[in-house]
Amino acid sequence: MDQDQNSPEISLAEQADLAESFVRELAETMGITLEFTRHEMKDDILRIEAAGPDIGVLVGHGGGTAQAVDDLVRTVLQRAGGTIREGKIRIDIGGVRARRAEALEGFARRIADEVTETGRDIALEPMDRVDRKIVHDAVAALEEVASRSEGEGPQRRVVVFPSAE
Amino acid sequence: MSDLAPTARAVCDLVVRRIVDHPDEVAVAVSETGSVVRLEVSVADGDMGRVIGRRGRVAGAIRTVVKAAASQDDVEVEVEFVD
């Protein structure tokens, strides 16, 4: 908040154009042609999925390169409009983010089952805010369990617990 | 020299220029040590913080993407940020 106070806020559509042109240019420099599709998600999140025949280079081992591209997009957007809040635009290289979210939801439901069976809290590994939100949303859809976040910074983690009857 | 890891260099140059306030002051120097190509990135004084990022996250992302680009050149690269 203390820096870039004078940067104008830019609209979600402008952010999307900027994100897309950055990733397109990056891919073209690597000799890769991408197609982009935009998906409006809940909570005003715009997921931009990039696809193409040679997308694997940008996905990387375990999606590591895809995550790095998303980090760089966020940095580019912060520079363009210093006041934007983190995380409205999500670049999803090769759809890994969507698949990862599905896997994480499944994991959250299995943890929830375990909490329901044992009646005990389960603390998950530390996760970033995006992943925590996916877990919280998955847990919120279930009746027998609830969730909260604990810890600070990189140690912040989700705790799933039985909801009060 | 100019034919060492051209894709990695171009990607490194592009990415760093897009995130700094002074793109004209970005320079990427290339050297070769054995089988490893070293990219030494220098930026304007005030831009180093942005290029490194909180907990080195931006620098890590740049390294990851540049290494991916280097696979197109069939070489191994190291990226260093120099003052």
Image: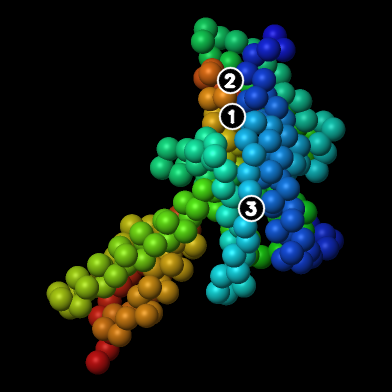
Q: Position of residue A85 (x, y in %)?
A: 66, 65
* Foreground: disc 3 or disc 2: 3
Image position of A98 with respect to A120: above or below: above
Residue depicted at x 76% and y 25%: B27
Query: Could you tell me residue A120's position as x and y percent?
Result: 19, 74
Which numbered circle lies on residue A36? 3
Q: Residue at x 79, y 34 (%)?
A: B44
Pointer 2: what residue? Answer: B73
> Residue flagged by tag 1: what amino acid is it?
Ala
Type of colouring? rainbow
**Mark 3–mark 2 contact, CB under 8 Å?**
no
Residue reaching furthest to the front: A53
Q: Chain of mark 3?
A: A
Q: Secondary structure at mark 3?
A: strand
For disc 1, the chain is B
The Cα–Cα distance between marks 3 and 2, rounded to whole angstroms, is 26 Å
Parent chain of label 2: B
Q: Which residue is mark 1?
A: B69
Residue drawn at x 71%, y 40% is A25
As measured in the structure, the alpha-carbon distance from the residue carrying label 1 to the one carrying label 2 is 7 Å
Query: Do dots 3 and 1 share one subunit?
Result: no
**B43 lies above or below A34:** above
Q: Quadrant of residue B18?
A: top right
Q: Quadrant of residue A54?
A: top right
| Quadrant where the image shows the N terminus of chain B | top right
Q: Is residue A105 above or below residue B30?
A: below
Tell me if mark 2 has few (under 14), some (14-19) or many (20+) residues whose alpha carbon lies within 10 angstroms of its own: some
Badges 3 and 2, same chain: no
Please say if the residues under marks 1 and 2 sit with CB atoms less than 8 Å apart: yes
> Which of these two is toward me, A121 or B30?
B30
In the picture, measured across the screen, residue A95 lies left or right of residue B16, that is left
- Looking at the rendered structure, the kind of residue marked 2 is Asp
